[in-house]
Image (cartoon, helix red, strand yellow):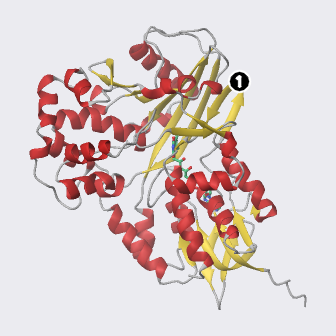
Amino acid sequence: MTVAARAPLHDLAVCGGGISGLALAYLAGTRGVADVVVLEGAGRPGGKIQTEWVDGFCCEWGPQGFLDNVPETLALVAGLGLDGELVRADDAAGDRFIARNGRLRKVPLSPPAFLTSDVLSLPGRLRVLLEPFQRRGALEESVFTFAARRIGREAAEVLVDAMVTGVYAGDPARLSLPATFPKMRAMERDYGSLVRAMLARRKSGGGGPAGPGGTLTTLRLGMQQLTDALASALGAGVRLGVPVERITRGAGAFAVRLGDGSEVAAKQVAVAMPPGAAARALGELLPEGAVAALQGIPYAKVAVVMTGYRAPHPFAHPTRGFGFLVPGRERRRILGSIFCDATFPAQAPAGATLLRTLLGGARDPGALDLSDGELLALARRELDHFLGGDPEPDFVRIIRHDYGIPQYTLGHLARLDEIERAAAAIPGLHLLGNGFHGIAANACVVEAERIAAAVAGGA
Ligand SMILES: Cc1cc2nc3c(=O)[nH]c(=O)nc-3n(C[C@H](O)[C@H](O)[C@H](O)COP(=O)(O)OP(=O)(O)OC[C@H]3O[C@@H](n4cnc5c(N)ncnc54)[C@H](O)[C@@H]3O)c2cc1C
């Protein structure tokens, strides 16, 4: 009889090698957790973060950047020796546009500009002025209910819908305010009014091109430079093409079963996979209620259509600025389009225009059923509608995310509570990723830092 060689006992196994898992593995290492293995199902590290360069056009599959106002991300970048590689959005990206009644309107950036802007009707603007006099709301309500109560229905349908579209590709009537925009709930709680809170914030400074409270930032080679640097710092500690199927716990160690039937043993396990995959892997370890809560975190499908044009000024409407968003009430089929070359000039050849048009989202999941040709034709029709002109693109890339952006719908905080109470009852088990406490790359790094500290402390 042959005795199978005992699997080495790692200090930490991280399941999922997106930015959450890679950052956790790296940060745990810097805190003295010596033997860390990352188990990634796909054939490449980085998850949603993927950058492709074609003939001088930069194609970001997922995030385009992160706001430079989160110290944890900047410290991570500096720790990897990449601070000289940071690229901040150009000042030209300061202008943003919102579609209203079929036309793009500049988003006003100051109270006087708002009063004279055509982004809302006059009654809509006057209703916003009544914001300080509105009553407080329930502890949990949808983003739409909150916004309509505080700033009126029109501003909710135009301004807030556009913001939710831009960040979540989501439906404001289904998203939970305290889970998605906790700062707004806090502003109402602490100041009784968003206007009063914003005035107080303006006094203390902040803000920059392409991002309230920070400047949109990427790296010279694109976002993948960050995940590539993490993966190469981790070296052989990153295993690719090894989907995690089941996580169980025996005497003093976790066993992680992989797709090929082999097992990895570790003293602690961190699950940095999307909640649906986490639910499948943790089915034997977590109680039914927590598994159902994980399964209850839905995702919006998103398609990204990248189009590049070598001819200068290919559209009637100038594509200077960050880009434009299209609220649901416009009844159009794109969520918006980002003017990539204006935001990050080095991401397109000199004089060229690069647009990143988003389709799908909670509003229009059926868009992902279209063929590539149909998606491109649809994006071009919509760009023609808003920007004027249908120039032939010199560069096209179509990217589909069937599990694009997690939706923190009503009840999200209760689901999180159930999941986290169950996980806390199993010492050494950790959950992270953008399905839980924040959908942006910055939030992933903040969570990774918090969990690295817990892992190092042996929790
Ligand atoms: C189109 C788009 C645009 C975005 N734009 C921005 C932006 O501009 N700024 C911003 O901050 N954020 C943006 N985001 C969000 C950002 O991409 C995420 O916050 C971040 O990349 C999520 O990282 P993660 O590691 O938590 O998850 P993921 O990147 O999803 O990583 C999870 C990993 O787990 C792996 N996995 C899944 N199942 C298994 C399994 N069974 N076994 C092993 N591994 C498994 C996956 O292959 C993946 O690598 C955008 C997202 C999308 C889709």
Q: Is residue 155 above or below residue 3?
A: above
> Circle 1: is it few (<14), some (14-19), or many (20+) Cα within 10 Å?
some
x and y percentages locating residue 188 in the rendered image: 21, 53
Q: How many numbered discs sit on the rendered protein?
A: 1
Which residue lies under the disc numbered 1? 56
Residue located 53% across and 54% down the image: 71
x and y percentages locating residue 252 in the rendered image: 65, 90
Q: Amino acid at mark 1?
A: Gly
Check mark 1 vs ligand 1: CB closer than 8 Å? yes or no: no
Q: To which quarter of the image does residue 79 belong?
A: bottom right
Q: Quadrant of the N terminus?
A: bottom right
Q: Quadrant of the C terminus?
A: bottom right
Horizontal side of 256 relative to 201 (left or right) equals right
Q: Residue furthest right?
A: 1
Horizontal side of 444 relative to 1 (left or right) equals left
x and y percentages locating residue 117 in the rendered image: 24, 21
x and y percentages locating residue 230 in the rendered image: 70, 55
In depth, the one of 102 and 346 nearer the eye is 346
Q: To which quarter of the image does residue 211 belong?
A: top left
Horizontal side of 375 relative to 411 (left or right) equals right
In depth, the one of 255 and 183 nearer the eye is 183
- Can I make out residue 438 in this image? yes
In depth, the one of 447 and 416 nearer the eye is 447
Residue located 21% across and 34% down the image: 155
- Can I make out residue 44 in this image? no
- Considering the numbered disc 1 on the image, is that residue within a helix, a strand or a loop? loop
Residue located 42% across and 42% down the image: 167
Q: Is residue 71 above or below residue 398?
A: below
